[in-house]
Image (spheres, coloured by chain):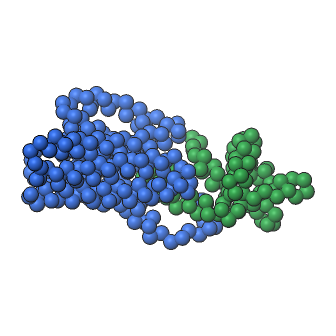
């Protein structure tokens, strides 16, 4: 049975992809985010706009394509997410 | 004021401290992650904490209450019990939301049976006690089921803590006036509350996380 992911979990997964798949330091494209994030294109496009707007992702245009990197604020969000996910799990809940 | 009353009152205020500590951490979680689960958890423990405070105040107030003030003291008790029931409801409701969102309706549907169980009782106090017991019991089941999946020792600790609280409530339901059982149910609730405090302690003493930790 596929595991249900909360919105927070999806955002955390996108940020982790932007953090871990940024091998060359230039950021990751939307295709990589889609493949690892496992959400539809339209939803991912909206999420990216929201995350860039919230300052969690940094957007740069290279060779006419958008690349995304995790920001310091995004790193801090991930750190908080891990801590509070553990806390919510203690009560048998998902964050 | 007998030692049992002192112990019972102290328990209420310890309960309030534990509940508000959990609510505080959960509220921090709401601010930092905007999680609705954390919001429900914070609401549940704010209700529980306020309920504990009111019941503690009832304990103090009922000892030396002047004639004419008995009514307000009794109102304090009922308000405290109502808030505690609301707190346990939010805790159970958090699990219901989690279960429904994950598409598994097995245990969640059992919740609809509660009016039959609760409304067969007579006084408001007994109804509130029955509902609280029911909601905690539901929380115990769902938390234990979560432990079977995540194997997180803290989840087991919370399930055990809620289990002790539920057992305490059950004893107070079936034998409210037996002194020895009254002491037993107070001890059970005390141990249960202390178990609930473990994740707060763990959270408070946690070192700043590794920014590159897996999520």
Tell me where residue B38 appears, x and y as whole percent.
48, 50
- Residue at image x 40%, y 66%? B201
Q: Is residue B139 above or below residue B121?
A: below
Tell me where residue A51 appears, x and y as whole percent.
69, 52
- Asked whether the viewer can see residue B214, the reply is no
Judge by depth and name the residue closer to the eye, A65 or B181: A65
Task: Tell me, by letter, which chain the rendering colours green.
Answer: A
Judge by depth and name the residue closer to the eye, B50 or A18: B50
**Tally of numbered discs:** 0
Judge by depth and name the residue closer to the eye, B124 or B113: B124
- Residue at image x 27%, y 53%? B53
Question: In the figure, is residue B182 to the left or right of B207?
Answer: left
Q: Is residue B1 above or below residue B96?
A: below
Task: Tell me, by letter, which chain the rendering colours blue.
Answer: B
Q: Residue furthest right?
A: A63
Tell me where residue B54 appears, x and y as whole percent.
26, 49
- Asked whether the viewer can see residue A63, the reply is yes
The N terminus of chain A lies in quadrant: top right
- Residue at image x 52%, y 61%? A83
Q: For residue B75, which quarter of the picture?
A: top left
Tell me where residue B164 appears, x and y as whole percent.
27, 52
- Residue at image x 70%, y 62%? A71
Q: Is residue B98 above or below residue B23?
A: above
Question: In the figure, is residue B36 to the left or right of B125?
Answer: right
């Amino acid at each position: 049975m596929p595991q249900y992911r909360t919105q927070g979990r999806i955002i955390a997964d996108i940020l982790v992809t932007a953090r871990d798949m940024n091998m060359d330091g230039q950021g990751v494209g939307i295709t990589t985010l889609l493949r690892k994030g496992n959400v539809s294109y339209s939803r991912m496009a909206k999420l990216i706009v929201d995350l860039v707007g919230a300052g969690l992702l940094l957007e740069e245009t290279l060779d006419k394509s958008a690349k995304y990197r995790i920001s310091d604020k995004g790193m801090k969000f991930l750190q908080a997410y891990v801590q509070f996910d553990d806390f919510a799990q203690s009560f048998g809940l998902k964050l | 004021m007998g030692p049992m009353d002192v112990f019972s009152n102290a328990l209420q205020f310890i309960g309030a401290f534990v509940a508000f500590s959990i609510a505080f951490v959960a509220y921090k979680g709401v601010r930092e992650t905007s999680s609705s689960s954390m919001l429900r958890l914070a609401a549940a423990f704010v209700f529980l904490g306020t309920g504990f405070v009111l019941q503690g105040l009832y304990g103090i107030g009922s000892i030396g209450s002047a004639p004419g003030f008995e009514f307000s003291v009794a109102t304090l008790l009922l308000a405290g019990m109502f808030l505690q029931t609301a707190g346990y409801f939010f805790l159970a409701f958090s699990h219901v939301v989690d279960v429904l969102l994950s598409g598994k309706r097995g245990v969640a549907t059992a919740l609809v049976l509660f009016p039959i169980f609760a409304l067969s009782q007579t006084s408001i106090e007994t109804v509130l006690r029955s509902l609280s017991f029911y909601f905690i019991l539901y929380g115990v089941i769902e938390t234990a089921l979560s432990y079977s999946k995540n194997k997180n020792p803290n989840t087991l600790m919370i399930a055990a803590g809620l289990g002790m609280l539920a057992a305490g409530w059950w004893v107070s339901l079936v034998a409210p006036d037996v002194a020895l059982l009254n002491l037993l149910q107070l001890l059970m609730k005390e141990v249960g509350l202390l178990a609930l405090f473990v994740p707060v302690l763990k959270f408070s003493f946690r070192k700043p996380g590794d920014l590159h930790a897996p999520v």
